[in-house]
């Protein structure tokens, strides 16, 4: 473990997230499958504030990569208290692995943990192409052979269709991100993430009511979804969300989250039921953020 780097991070970053970073680091490095742990973002650069996320790159032995991904949700939810299953991050750049965003209650607020999991054979490439600080190396002299199965697994995971539950999680995570942008006054990023929020809501409606759609994006949405009363109600809510201020406010975000709840109640009740306790916790902590 790189104590010098950890000490310098502690001196540069006094927000409460540092305690979460230490706890997460202890959790991930317990696994013999984890060979490297890197910190990215504002915690690594010393520019963190109380809203900053904890951003990790976790390198896992190639032969253990698939099993580690399969256990990640349970690991974060049980040992770190994550309130939702991880959202497979569609914003992070492709570094040969898979990215996830988790929301974890910490020090009276929701905190964001970004985890990008890579096979250990890719760690040097990631070092060359991203700004990160190494805080853990299991064996500095080890060499890692790439596995042919990992790129195939990553490609299949990225291409897999998302379920209604996946999309509902995406909407909730994006709602948290927007809340953070509003608090920071980051209008441009809030605008971008608000579009993603609306798009994820549209995708939720299509996955629930037009799962065999052959049309891309927003095309033929009224024709495919608006043929039933439930579909028309869902599109009415979606229209109101799209017509809201391009730069979201707390009021428009709250209205959007309420409309998403109504859409899920009508169109994807099973997904909503499976996440109901998590959504209650999300709403409670979001009010404290």
Image: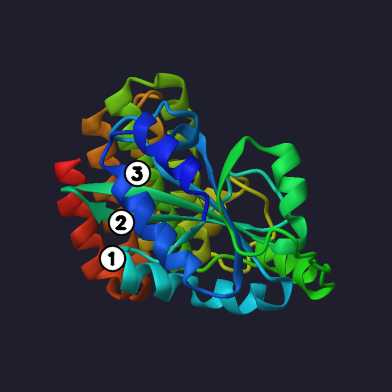
Q: Where residue 69 sits in the image (x, y, percent)?
A: 57, 71
Which residue is pictured at 58% across the width and 45% down the height?
218
Residues under numbered marks 2 and 1 in contact, where contact means CB atoms less than 8 Å apart: yes
Q: Nearer the viewer, mark 3 or mark 1?
A: 1
Q: Is residue 138 above or below residue 6?
A: below
Q: Secondary structure at mark 2?
A: strand
Query: Marks 2 and 3, Cα distance to the nearest angstrom?
Result: 15 Å
Q: Secondary structure at mark 1?
A: loop
Which residue is pictured at 37% across the width and 48% down the height?
112
Residues under numbered marks 2 and 3 in contact, where contact means CB atoms less than 8 Å apart: no
Disc ID at residue 104: 2
Q: Earlier in the sequence, mark 2 or mark 3?
A: 2
Residues under numbered marks 3 and 1 in contact, where contact means CB atoms less than 8 Å apart: no
Is residue 94 shown left or right of residue 236?
Answer: right
Q: Where residue 270 sits in the image (x, y, percent)?
A: 35, 76
Q: Identify the image quadrant of residue 176.
A: top left
Q: Where residue 127 sits in the image (x, y, percent)?
A: 70, 43
Query: Marks 3 and 1, Cα distance to the nearest angstrom?
Result: 19 Å
- Whether residue 172 can be seen here: no
Is residue 126 shown left or right of residue 80?
Answer: right
Q: Where residue 217 sits in the image (x, y, percent)?
A: 62, 47
Query: Label 1: which residue?
Result: 81
| Of residues 32 and 193, the one drawn nearer to the viewer in this rendering | 32
| Of residues 11 and 184, the one drawn nearer to the viewer in this rendering | 11
How busy is the neighbourhood of tag 1: few (under 14 within 10 Å), some, or many (20 plus)?
A: some
């Amino acid at each position: 473990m790189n104590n010098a780097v950890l000490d310098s991070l502690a001196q540069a970053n006094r927000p409460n997230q540092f305690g979460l970073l230490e706890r997460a680091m202890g959790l991930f490095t317990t696994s013999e499958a984890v060979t490297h742990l890197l910190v990215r973002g504002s915690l690594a650069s010393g520019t963190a504030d109380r809203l900053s996320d904890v951003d990790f790159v976790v390198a896992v032995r190639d032969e253990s990569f698939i099993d580690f991904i399969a256990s990640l949700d349970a690991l974060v939810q049980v040992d770190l208290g994550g309130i939702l299953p991880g959202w497979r991050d569609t914003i992070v750049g492709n570094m040969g692995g898979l990215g996830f965003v988790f929301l974890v209650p910490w020090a009276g607020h929701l905190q964001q943990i970004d985890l990008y999991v890579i096979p250990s054979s890719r760690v040097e490439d990631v070092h060359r192409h991203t700004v990160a600080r190494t805080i853990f190396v299991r064996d500095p002299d080890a060499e890692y052979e790439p596995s042919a199965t990992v790129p195939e697994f990553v490609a299949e995971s990225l291409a897999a269709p998302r379920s209604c539950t996946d999309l509902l999680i995406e909407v909730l995570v994006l709602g948290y991100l927007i809340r953070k942008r509003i608090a920071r006054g980051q209008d441009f990023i809030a605008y971008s993430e608000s579009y993603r929020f609306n798009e994820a809501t549209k995708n939720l409606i299509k996955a629930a009511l037009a799962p065999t759609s052959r049309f891309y994006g927003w095309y033929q949405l009224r024709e495919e979804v608006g043929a039933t009363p439930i579909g028309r109600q869902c599109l009415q809510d979606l229209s109101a969300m799209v017509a809201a201020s391009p730069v979201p406010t707390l009021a428009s975000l709250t209205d959007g989250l309420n409309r998403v709840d109504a859409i899920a109640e009508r169109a994807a009740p099973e997904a909503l039921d499976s996440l109901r306790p998590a959504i209650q916790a999300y709403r409670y902590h979001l009010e404290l953020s």
